[in-house]
Amino acid sequence: MIKTIFTKYSILLLFINIMVIISFSNFSTYGVNKTVGWAYDITDLNFINGIKFSISIVIFLVGYGVIFILNRKTVFSISVLHFLILIISILFEKHNLTIVNLFLFIISMGLFVINLLKSYK
C-alpha cells in the first residue's frame, strides 16, 4: 500500500507537503499599516526563500502531475527520499537557516529530476 502511494500517487504526497507548508510555515503578510513607500523590501532572505520554495513546489506539482497523467510510476526509494527532504526543508524554513535550505533545495531538485528520468510504466 505504501509502495503504491510513493510510486504511483506521488502527487498526493506533494499535496500533503503543501498542506504542511500552509499550516506550519511563516509565510504571512507583513508591514500591514506600516508606511513603507511604493516598493517591497526584497533583500530579506525569508522573502527570497519563500519565492524559491514556491516555485519549486509548482515545478514538482507539474512534474508529478504529468507522471500521474501518463500513468507512470516513480522509483520507491527516490520518492521516499524526496518526500523526506521536502519535510526536512519545511522544518528548517522555520529556523531561517538559509545555507541549509539552499543545500536541501539543490538536493531536492536533483532527486526530482532523477525521479522524472527514472519513471517507468
Image: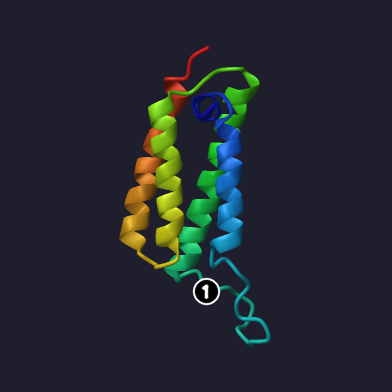
- Residue at x 37% of width, y 36% of height: 110
| Extreme residue in the front direction | 1
Q: Residues within 10 Å of mark 1 (few under 14, many from 20)?
A: few
- Residue at x 55% of width, y 29% of height: 5
In this rendering, does residue 105 appear at all?
Answer: yes
The quarter of the picture where residue 62 lies is top right
The quarter of the picture where residue 57 lies is top right
Q: Is residue 96 above or below residue 63?
A: below
| Extreme residue in the right direction | 33
How many discs mark residues in the rendered view?
1
Helix, strand or loop under label 1: loop
Task: Check disc 1 and report the residue beneath it.
Answer: 41
Q: Position of residue 47 (x, y in %)?
A: 50, 65
Q: Position of residue 61 (x, y in %)?
A: 59, 38
In the displayed structure image, the side of residue 61 where residue 82 appears, left or right? left
Q: Position of residue 33 (x, y in %)?
A: 68, 86
In this rendering, does residue 112 appear at all?
Answer: no
In the displayed structure image, the side of residue 40 where residue 87 appears, left or right? left
Colouring of the image: rainbow
Name the image quarter holding the N terminus: top right
- Residue at x 55% of width, y 62% of height: 24
Q: Give the residue type that dot 1 points to.
A: Asp
Relative to the observer, which residue lies in front, 105 or 94? Answer: 94
The quarter of the picture where residue 70 lies is top right
Q: Is residue 119 above or below residue 37?
A: above
| Extreme residue in the top direction | 121
Q: Position of residue 103 (x, y in %)?
A: 32, 50
- Residue at x 66% of width, y 81% of height: 32
